[in-house]
Image: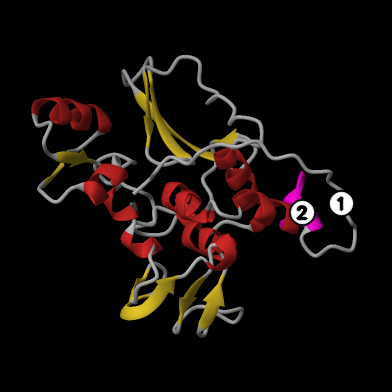
Amino acid sequence: MARQTSKQPHHFQISIRPDDDHSRNVGSVLMQDINEAAKGHWPSILGALAGLSQQQLTDKHQPCPLCGGTDRYRFDDQDGNGSWFCNKCGGKTQSGGAGSGMDMLMRKNNWDFKRAASEVERQLGISKPKPSIPIKNAEAIYHYSEDLVVARVPDAKTGKSFRQLWFDGNKWVYKLPDKYKLPNSKPLFNLGKIRATKGWVLVTEGEKACEAAAKHFPTLACTTWSGGCKGHGKN
């Protein structure tokens, strides 16, 4: 479940070293800088950006957010670094051991370090705000996640068309990443409400119908998928 985090300014003097393993992928900050900025904020960061629940952010044995199981995972957040342990998929070799908050964020979202660092900066309020979605004539824009939106635009031939856009960490692009081309890879609409509900979930075809249903049935979590009537197998 996404939660808000307090945004506090951080100031660093940044130096990019050519021989740094991460400097080729990070851009504005080095790994130690972003981890220092995120220190103490990992529960809210992972809740907002990785969708981890309050239960998954506790130091109790439970199923792993990455590989499942029953009691193989716990989140201990040692020294505020977002540390966690999974005896199945944790560690550098992903065969059991500990991981950091950044490890969890990257693996849960299939992000590289550059993308993860950019999102953490934005979440903490130490980077430029995300640019506007570059569609001027959209009738509606539906936000499926922080990095995936669907825009409904008028079409002279069919009356309407839909465009999917993905935020790559720097700009909005129309070409979706490979991770969203796999079966069952795209997030459902209103996923946060689905995770929060303890009741019924109403599934509709199309975002417009979903929003209308939500008005008529305010106690239900209403959802749909992107890609039209034949797109459900891709979400």
Q: Residue most toward the front?
A: 79
User: Which amino acid type is marked by label 2?
Assistant: Leu
For this view, does 205 lie left or right of residue 216? Answer: right
Indicate the position of residue 228 as horizontal and vertical percent values: 29, 39
Which class describes the residues within 10 Å of circle 2: few (<14), some (14-19), or many (20+)? many
Res. 81 in view: no
In the depicted structure, whether residue 76 falls above or below residue 97:
above
Residue 220 sits above or below residue 1 on the image: above
- Of mark 1 and mark 2, the one earlier in the sequence is 1
Residue nearest the viewer, comparing 186 with 72: 72
The crowding category of the residue bearing disc 1, from other C-alpha atoms within 10 Å (few below 14, some 14 to 19, many at least 20), is some
Q: For the point 12% across and 39% down, which residue is it?
A: 220
| Above or below, 118 relative to 71 | above
| Residue 197: percent from left, percent from top | 18, 47
Is disc 1 in contact with disc 2, using a CB cutoff of under 8 Å? yes
Write down the residue under mark 1: 16
Marks 1/2: CA–CA distance = 7 Å
SS for dot 1: loop
Element marked by disc 2: loop
Q: At 42% across and 51% down in the image, what residue appears? A: 47
The one of 163 and 149 positioned closer to us in this rendering:
149
- Residue farthest to the right, as pictured: 18
Q: Quadrant of residue 210?
A: top left
Residue that badge 2 annotates:
30
| Nearest to the observer: residue 17 or residue 185 | 17
Location of residue 60 (image quadrant): bottom left
Q: Which residues are magenta?
A: 23-31
